[in-house]
Image (cartoon, helix red, strand yellow):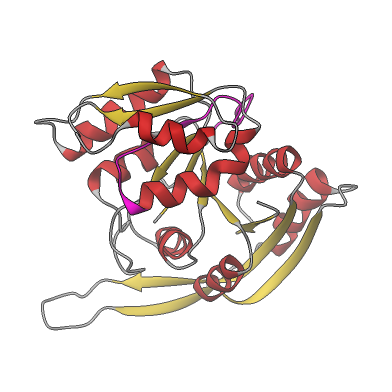
Amino acid sequence: MRRVVIHLHGSSSDTTPLASAIDFCRKLNARLSVVFIRRTREFIPAPADGIPGAFYETEVEAAPEAERAYREMCDGLSFISYTEADIDSIDMITQNGLLHDLTVVERLTEREGSKVADFNTAVFGTGAPVMITPPAAMATVAETPAVVWNASLPSARAIRSAVPLLRIAKKTTILSSADNPHADPSALARYLDCYGIKCESATFRTDKLTARARGRSMLEAARNAGADLLVMGAFGESKITAMLGLGRATEKVVMSSKVPLLVQA
């Protein structure tokens, strides 16, 4: 990972994900693109069956706040650039995602609205991983990561993307469901060993649990492992119109995790 992007909206919550992005880029010796987006795209759901929903754009008047956050946190850091975009957020996130290795977003607190559309675009519309930052700043990031292995394409993509981080971590833990016979942690450990990554392993339960309960079980396993980053595949709908277009287990993790997430669809 050599090029990371974060999109600011000029809100008071911009500083925490920006700080995480800066620390992340320092760790990987990567370049950071900071982009302020002037326009967001809202989706209005259909009022009744047979009537299509509609998009409308809104203009964000917060450029001075976004630039001030950038100046306060990024002045003097040569690996960071700042630009302002006049196209709407969905188009900008898509374009930037194609030419960056990672998009950084803040954790969602709602299931619909412009931030959800932006989130879905980053996860399902860029072909690259997304780092989701929690509301509170972390003392460390990616020193003791955990990776969720369920023998699926999304989890394989996410773990492959995370290899540069795992190679410099102090400890990596493989988390897998004790109820999934296909998710063999030793097979993943052999793969990661090719990159010089030594792993521990732990399991969590999923049998007879609801989707949200499976998400809670996964988070508990990550917490018990002392993880300061959780790497996992993202499952759900590739529609920006979906209300947080994730599977319910993934949604629970995304909206509740107290540590950063690295997810990929």
Point out residue 127 in the picture as x, y percentages from the top left corner: 48, 64
Residue 82's place in the image compared with 214, above or below, is below
Q: Please tell me which residue is depicted at 30% across the width and 58% down the height of the picture.
A: 245
Q: Quadrant of residue 208?
A: top left
Q: Please tell me which residue is depicted at 76% across the width and 57% down the height of the picture.
A: 67
In the figure, is residue 3 to the left or right of 237? Answer: right
Decide if residue 258 is in sight here: yes
Q: Nearer the viewer, residue 48 or 218?
A: 218
Q: Is residue 140 magenta?
A: yes
What segment is highlighted magenta in the picture? 136-153
List the single residue furthest toward the right. 76
Residue 105's place in the image compared with 237, above or below, is above
Point out residue 33 in the picture as x, y percentages from the top left corner: 72, 59
Decide if residue 106 is in sight here: no
Q: Please tell me which residue is depicted at 48% across the width and 18% down the height of the picture.
A: 226
**Quadrant (top left, top right, bottom left, bottom right) of the C terminus:** bottom left
Residue 239's place in the image compared with 20, above or below, is below
Q: Quadrant of residue 209?
A: top left
Q: Nearer the viewer, residue 262 or 148?
A: 148
Q: Please tell me which residue is depicted at 79% across the width and 44% down the height of the picture.
A: 73
Q: Is residue 150 magenta?
A: yes
Q: Magenta part mainly helix, strand or loop?
A: loop
Point out residue 167 in the picture as x, y percentages from the top left corner: 62, 34
Residue 86's place in the image compared with 23, above or below, is below
Point out residue 173 in the picture as x, y percentages from the top left corner: 45, 25
